[in-house]
Amino acid sequence: MDQIKIGRFIAERRKAVGLTQMQLAELLSITDRAVSKWENGRSMPDSSIMLELCKILKINVNDLLHGEVITMENYNKEAEKVMLDMVKQKEENDRQLLTLEIVIGVICMVYLLALTFLAAFLPMADWLHIVVIVGAFIPTLVGIGFALRIEQTAGYYECAKCKHRYVPSYSSVLWAMHMGRTRYMKCPKCQQRSWQKKKIEKE
């Protein structure tokens, strides 16, 4: 999506319906600064107000996302393009999340090993040993839990039996045997268990 083009389109439609930035902002219960950011291409309208914005500007969401009024003859082609762009954006976001998962895992392990080393080799009172060890494990467990949530939601798992791709439940990912990003899970479609690989694309 071209935010600059969309911003100009919003400005054109706002003027066409005879509204100032302040008046449009009041109708949407937001600040005129937010409207200014849209029109300058620095941000996009939040999805929660997008329908109301389109109603006020007398356009539809498809028009808004393209930054122009789409004719019926081009509607299907343009709608398909928007869907493809959204899919590509999700795939890119999933790749970034999976990279973040690795970073979180490395940081957690380094943190755990560092504090465990301190507790094991530095002289300190017994109670302080316990505090350090607990202080090592709790943040590590939280970090691992967050990394597992990324592992669950970013991308899809592909069943080795029927090739169905799906997003598993958190508990399935948590308790499944795994080798890297390949997990032994039950497919919701064919109900067979297999070693299922992580995939970024839906199909």
Image (cartoon, grey):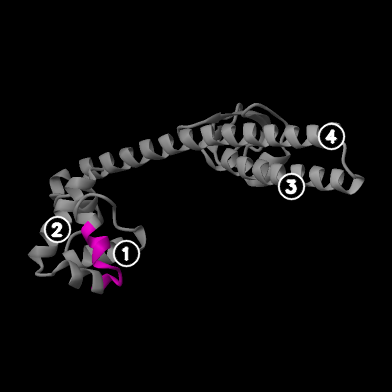
Q: Amino acid at mark 1?
A: Ile
Q: Which residue is mark 1?
A: 49
- Is residue 155 inside the magenta stretch? no
Q: Which mark is residue 122?
A: 4
Mark 2 secondary-structure assignment: helix
Q: Which residue is mark 2?
A: 11
Q: Is residue 49 left or right of residue 153?
A: left
- Is residue 31 inside the magenta stretch? yes
Quadrant of the rendered image containing residue 174: top right
Q: Amino acid at mark 2?
A: Ala
Q: CA gap, disc 4 to disc 1?
A: 57 Å
Q: Amino acid at mark 4?
A: Leu
Instruction: Give x and y (percent) for residue 41.
Output: 22, 49
Q: Amino acid at mark 3?
A: Ile
Q: CA gap, disc 4 to disc 3?
A: 21 Å
Dot 2 or dot 4, earlier in sequence: 2
Q: CA gap, disc 1 to disc 2?
A: 16 Å
Q: CA gap, disc 2 to disc 4?
A: 65 Å
Q: Is residue 77 left or right of residue 202?
A: left
Quadrant of the rendered image containing residue 162: top right
Report the quarter where the N terminus lies.
top left
Q: Which residues are magenta?
A: 27-36
Q: Is residue 34 left or right of residue 110?
A: left
Mark nearer the viewer, 4 or 3: 4
Do labels 4 and 1 touch, CB within 8 Å? no
User: Which residue is found at the position 70% from the left and 46% from the top?
Assistant: 139
User: Which residue is found at the position 52% from the left and 39% from the top?
Assistant: 154
Mark nearer the viewer, 2 or 3: 3
Instruction: Give x and y (percent) for residue 116.
Output: 79, 35
Q: Which mark is residue 146?
A: none
Q: Which residue is mark 3?
A: 138
